[in-house]
Image (tube, rainbow, N blue to C red):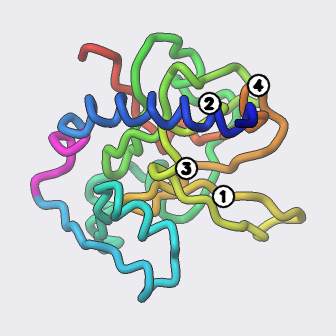
């Protein structure tokens, strides 16, 4: 068994334990009028939807008007229009407590404080998501370089990008927009 596979397996077991604990909390934080669709990987051509569905993550879909009602203008700009917040503007940069970072739009737990590190970039950074099923990664060619965009697996909100210049054990840097996340302190 190679080291990367071992670390992935250990991370997956830990993520499963964390998700099991917070699944009820994430569902309780959804608005009462949310719309849930099952997500069809074959129809949409997105293989990650199939994985997410198999792990119990059901798609949340809303109209633009509904998203605008529940998100602030800045949250809407980042999560629905793929905007970027100013570096060093997020209060999440200074959070060092134990807990979970959830998608601000749908409440899906996406990152753990255990994987958070100070990248010096001005955005909250993590070396891995809670589980690979909690995020979708897609190719982004919107700027001068090809990047990997990170989306919430439940509602397709733009969270940020992932780069391969992070710390051990993964070597990845999930550089997230703080406005796209909300922090839930452990035990809260």
**Distance of mark 2 from mark 4, alpha carbons?**
17 Å
Sooner in the amino-acid sequence: mark 1 or mark 2: 2
**What residue sits right under mark 2 in the picture?**
124
Q: Secondary structure at mark 3?
A: strand
Residue 28 is covered by the magenta coloring? yes
Q: Contact, CB < 8 Å: mark 3 with mark 2? A: no
The CA distance from mark 1 to mark 4 is 21 Å
Q: Which residues are magenta?
A: 26-32
Above/below status of 93 relative to 57: above
Q: Earlier in the sequence, mark 3 or mark 2?
A: 2
Say which of 113 and 86 sits in front: 113
The residue lying at 38 percent from left, 44 percent from top is 104
Name the residue carrying label 4.
168
Q: Quadrant of residue 11?
A: top right
Task: Say which quarter of the image contains residue 122.
Answer: top right
Q: What distance separates the C-alpha of mark 3 from that of mark 1?
A: 8 Å
Task: Tell me which numbered mark, 1 or 4, is placed earlier along the sequence.
Answer: 1
Task: Please name the residue that numbered disc 1 is placed on.
Answer: 149
Q: In which quadrant of the rendered image does the N terminus lie?
A: top right
Residue 68 image position (x, y, % from top left): 33, 61
How far across and down, in percent of the image, does residue 143 sit? 82, 65
State the residue lying farthest toward the front. 1
**Rendered-image quadrant of the C terminus:** top left
Q: Residues within 10 Å of mark 2 (few under 14, many from 20)?
A: many
Real-space CA distance between mark 3 and mark 2, rounded to the nearest whole angstrom? 11 Å
What residue sits 89% from the left and 65% below the top? 144
What residue sits right under mark 3 in the picture? 159
Instruction: Of the two numbered discs 3 and 4 on the same chain, state the one appearing first in sequence.
Output: 3
Of the image marks 2 and 4, the number of the one nearer the N terminus: 2
The location of residue 110, given as percent across then percent down, is 45, 41
């Amino acid at each position: 068994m190679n080291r990367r596979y071992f670390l992935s397996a250990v991370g997956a077991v830990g993520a499963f334990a964390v998700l099991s604990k917070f699944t009820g909390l994430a569902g309780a934080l959804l608005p009462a009028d949310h719309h849930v669709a099952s997500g069809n990987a074959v129809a949409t051509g997105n293989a990650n939807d199939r994985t997410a569905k198999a792990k119990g993550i059901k798609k949340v879909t809303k109209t633009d008007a509904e998203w605008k009602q529940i998100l602030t203008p800045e949250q809407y700009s980042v999560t629905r229009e793929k905007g970027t917040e100013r570096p060093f503007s997020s209060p999440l940069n200074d959070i060092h407590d134990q807990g979970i970072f959830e998608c601000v739009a749908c409440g899906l737990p996406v990152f753990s404080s255990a994987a958070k590190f100070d990248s010096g970039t001005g955005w909250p950074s993590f070396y891995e998501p809670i589980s690979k099923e909690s995020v979708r990664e897609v190719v982004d060619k919107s700027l001068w370089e090809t990047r990997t965009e990170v989306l919430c697996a439940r509602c397709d909100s733009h969270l940020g990008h992932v780069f391969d210049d992070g710390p051990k054990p993964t070597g990845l840097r999930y550089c997230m927009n703080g406005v796209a996340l909300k922090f839930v302190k452990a035990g809260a």
